[in-house]
Image: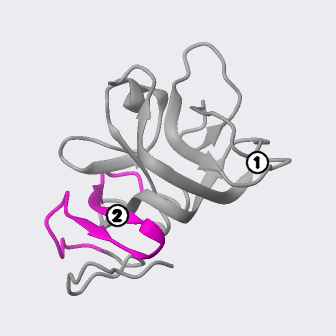
Amino acid sequence: MAFATDGKIGIDFTANTESALFEVGSTAKATDGQEYIYVQDSGSGITQYQWVGIDEDYDATALTTAHVTAGYKVGVAQVAITADYYGWVAVLGQNLTGKFAGAVTADADLYTTATGGSLDDADSTGLQRLQGVVPVATLTAASNAEVNIVSYIHSDHIV
Protein backbone atom coordinates (compact mmCIF):
# COMPACT_ATOMS: atom_id res chain seq x y z
CA MET A 1 0.00 0.00 0.00
CA ALA A 2 1.15 3.50 -0.78
CA PHE A 3 2.27 6.11 1.71
CA ALA A 4 1.64 9.85 1.44
CA THR A 5 4.73 11.69 0.23
CA ASP A 6 3.50 15.27 -0.03
CA GLY A 7 3.73 16.18 3.65
CA LYS A 8 -0.01 16.17 4.38
CA ILE A 9 -0.64 14.96 7.93
CA GLY A 10 -3.04 12.21 8.95
CA ILE A 11 -3.53 10.54 5.58
CA ASP A 12 -4.20 6.81 5.69
CA PHE A 13 -5.03 5.48 2.23
CA THR A 14 -6.35 2.25 3.80
CA ALA A 15 -8.94 3.89 6.07
CA ASN A 16 -12.57 4.60 5.38
CA THR A 17 -14.55 6.57 7.92
CA GLU A 18 -18.14 7.50 8.68
CA SER A 19 -17.22 11.18 9.11
CA ALA A 20 -15.08 13.16 6.67
CA LEU A 21 -11.49 13.65 7.84
CA PHE A 22 -10.60 15.81 4.83
CA GLU A 23 -12.52 17.94 2.36
CA VAL A 24 -13.94 15.72 -0.40
CA GLY A 25 -12.01 16.32 -3.59
CA SER A 26 -8.72 16.73 -1.70
CA THR A 27 -5.78 15.07 -3.42
CA ALA A 28 -2.61 13.53 -2.02
CA LYS A 29 0.54 12.29 -3.69
CA ALA A 30 1.99 8.93 -2.73
CA THR A 31 4.77 6.48 -3.54
CA ASP A 32 5.25 5.17 -7.13
CA GLY A 33 3.88 8.40 -8.60
CA GLN A 34 0.46 7.57 -7.21
CA GLU A 35 -2.14 10.23 -6.63
CA TYR A 36 -5.30 9.71 -4.62
CA ILE A 37 -8.52 11.70 -4.33
CA TYR A 38 -10.75 11.81 -1.24
CA VAL A 39 -14.34 10.77 -2.01
CA GLN A 40 -17.58 9.76 -0.36
CA ASP A 41 -19.28 6.55 -1.42
CA SER A 42 -22.66 7.46 -2.89
CA GLY A 43 -24.58 4.81 -1.02
CA SER A 44 -23.86 1.34 -2.42
CA GLY A 45 -20.42 0.56 -1.03
CA ILE A 46 -17.25 0.12 -3.06
CA THR A 47 -15.34 -3.15 -3.11
CA GLN A 48 -11.57 -3.39 -3.09
CA TYR A 49 -10.02 -2.91 -6.57
CA GLN A 50 -13.31 -1.73 -8.08
CA TRP A 51 -13.13 1.00 -10.73
CA VAL A 52 -15.23 3.99 -9.70
CA GLY A 53 -16.89 6.95 -11.34
CA ILE A 54 -16.45 10.20 -9.39
CA ASP A 55 -18.99 12.95 -9.97
CA GLU A 56 -18.57 16.72 -9.55
CA ASP A 57 -19.46 16.46 -5.83
CA TYR A 58 -16.80 13.73 -5.35
CA ASP A 59 -19.40 11.05 -4.77
CA ALA A 60 -18.02 7.73 -5.97
CA THR A 61 -19.78 4.59 -7.16
CA ALA A 62 -18.97 1.50 -9.24
CA LEU A 63 -17.95 2.71 -12.72
CA THR A 64 -20.43 2.28 -15.56
CA THR A 65 -20.46 3.32 -19.19
CA ALA A 66 -23.01 6.02 -18.26
CA HIS A 67 -20.52 7.59 -15.81
CA VAL A 68 -17.84 7.79 -18.48
CA THR A 69 -20.30 9.18 -21.04
CA ALA A 70 -21.33 11.85 -18.49
CA GLY A 71 -17.69 12.88 -18.00
CA TYR A 72 -17.11 11.54 -14.49
CA LYS A 73 -13.55 11.24 -13.24
CA VAL A 74 -12.32 7.65 -13.04
CA GLY A 75 -10.38 6.05 -10.21
CA VAL A 76 -9.70 2.66 -8.70
CA ALA A 77 -10.30 1.79 -5.04
CA GLN A 78 -7.31 0.07 -3.46
CA VAL A 79 -9.40 -0.71 -0.36
CA ALA A 80 -13.12 -1.24 0.19
CA ILE A 81 -15.19 1.78 1.19
CA THR A 82 -18.34 1.16 3.22
CA ALA A 83 -21.64 2.59 1.93
CA ASP A 84 -21.89 6.34 2.66
CA TYR A 85 -18.34 6.42 4.15
CA TYR A 86 -15.33 8.48 3.07
CA GLY A 87 -12.05 7.17 1.69
CA TRP A 88 -9.25 7.55 -0.85
CA VAL A 89 -9.23 6.20 -4.43
CA ALA A 90 -6.25 6.15 -6.79
CA VAL A 91 -6.39 8.27 -9.94
CA LEU A 92 -2.75 8.09 -11.09
CA GLY A 93 0.39 6.01 -10.63
CA GLN A 94 2.09 2.64 -10.85
CA ASN A 95 1.68 -0.62 -8.90
CA LEU A 96 -2.08 -0.27 -8.50
CA THR A 97 -4.61 -3.10 -8.70
CA GLY A 98 -7.87 -3.05 -10.63
CA LYS A 99 -10.77 -5.43 -11.29
CA PHE A 100 -11.21 -7.00 -14.72
CA ALA A 101 -14.35 -8.72 -16.03
CA GLY A 102 -12.51 -11.22 -18.25
CA ALA A 103 -9.26 -12.14 -19.91
CA VAL A 104 -7.11 -9.10 -20.73
CA THR A 105 -3.97 -8.73 -22.83
CA ALA A 106 -1.05 -6.74 -21.39
CA ASP A 107 -0.93 -3.15 -22.68
CA ALA A 108 -4.37 -3.51 -24.34
CA ASP A 109 -6.96 -0.78 -24.73
CA LEU A 110 -9.54 -1.04 -21.95
CA TYR A 111 -13.29 -0.51 -22.04
CA THR A 112 -16.18 -0.18 -19.64
CA THR A 113 -18.28 -3.33 -19.21
CA ALA A 114 -21.81 -4.38 -18.34
CA THR A 115 -20.35 -5.32 -14.93
CA GLY A 116 -20.18 -2.11 -12.89
CA GLY A 117 -16.71 -1.51 -11.46
CA SER A 118 -14.84 -3.79 -13.88
CA LEU A 119 -12.93 -3.12 -17.10
CA ASP A 120 -12.12 -5.41 -20.04
CA ASP A 121 -10.24 -5.26 -23.34
CA ALA A 122 -13.29 -6.47 -25.28
CA ASP A 123 -14.97 -3.70 -27.25
CA SER A 124 -18.64 -3.81 -28.18
CA THR A 125 -21.31 -1.33 -29.16
CA GLY A 126 -22.11 1.24 -26.51
CA LEU A 127 -19.01 0.73 -24.36
CA GLN A 128 -16.48 3.48 -23.73
CA ARG A 129 -12.74 3.09 -24.32
CA LEU A 130 -10.66 4.52 -21.47
CA GLN A 131 -7.29 6.09 -22.12
CA GLY A 132 -4.57 6.43 -19.52
CA VAL A 133 -4.80 3.02 -17.83
CA VAL A 134 -2.56 0.11 -18.85
CA PRO A 135 -2.85 -3.54 -17.74
CA VAL A 136 0.66 -4.70 -16.80
CA ALA A 137 0.24 -8.43 -17.53
CA THR A 138 -1.97 -10.73 -19.57
CA LEU A 139 -4.88 -12.30 -17.66
CA THR A 140 -6.50 -15.54 -18.74
CA ALA A 141 -9.73 -15.02 -16.75
CA ALA A 142 -11.64 -12.42 -14.73
CA SER A 143 -9.40 -11.30 -11.89
CA ASN A 144 -7.82 -8.44 -9.99
CA ALA A 145 -4.53 -7.44 -11.57
CA GLU A 146 -1.80 -4.82 -11.54
CA VAL A 147 -2.34 -1.70 -13.60
CA ASN A 148 -0.47 1.51 -14.19
CA ILE A 149 -2.46 4.70 -14.58
CA VAL A 150 -0.11 6.68 -16.78
CA SER A 151 -2.29 9.76 -17.13
CA TYR A 152 -5.57 10.90 -15.70
CA ILE A 153 -8.09 8.48 -17.17
CA HIS A 154 -10.47 9.80 -19.78
CA SER A 155 -12.69 8.39 -22.50
CA ASP A 156 -12.26 8.81 -26.23
CA HIS A 157 -15.05 11.35 -26.56
CA ILE A 158 -13.98 13.63 -23.72
CA VAL A 159 -11.38 16.18 -24.77
Tell me what residue is drawn at x 80 percent, y 50 percent.
Answer: 139
- Magenta run includes residue 29: yes
Q: Which residue lies furthest to the left in this view?
A: 23
Q: In this view, does 151 lie to the left or right of 27?
A: right
Q: In which quarter of the image is the C terminus?
A: top left
Q: Is residue 154 left or right of residue 125?
A: left
| Helix, strand or loop under label 2 | strand
Of callouts 2 and 1, the N-terminal one:
2
Q: Check disc 2 and give the amino acid type.
A: Tyr
The correct choice, above or below, for 37 with respect to 114 in the image is below
Colouring convention used in this rendered image of the protein:
one colour
- Bounds of the magenta segment: 17-45
Tell me what residue is drawn at x 54 percent, y 39 percent.
Answer: 116
- Magenta run includes residue 139: no
Q: Name the residue under label 1.
A: 142
Q: Mark 2 points at which residue?
A: 36
Q: Which of 113 and 85 is in front in this view?
A: 113
Q: Is residue 108 left or right of residue 39?
A: right
Where's residue 11, x and y in %?
28, 81
| Helix, strand or loop under label 1 | loop
Count all numbered tags in the image, as a single digit.
Answer: 2
Q: In this view, does 82 lie to the left or right of 86?
A: right
Q: Which of marks 2 and 1 is in front?
A: 2
Where's residue 8, x and y in %?
20, 81
Q: Check disc 1 and give the amino acid type.
A: Ala
Tell me what residue is drawn at x 56 percent, y 22 percent.
Answer: 127
Q: Which residue lies furthest to the top in this view?
A: 125
Where's residue 30, x and y in %?
38, 74
Label 2 – label 1 distance at C-alpha: 25 Å
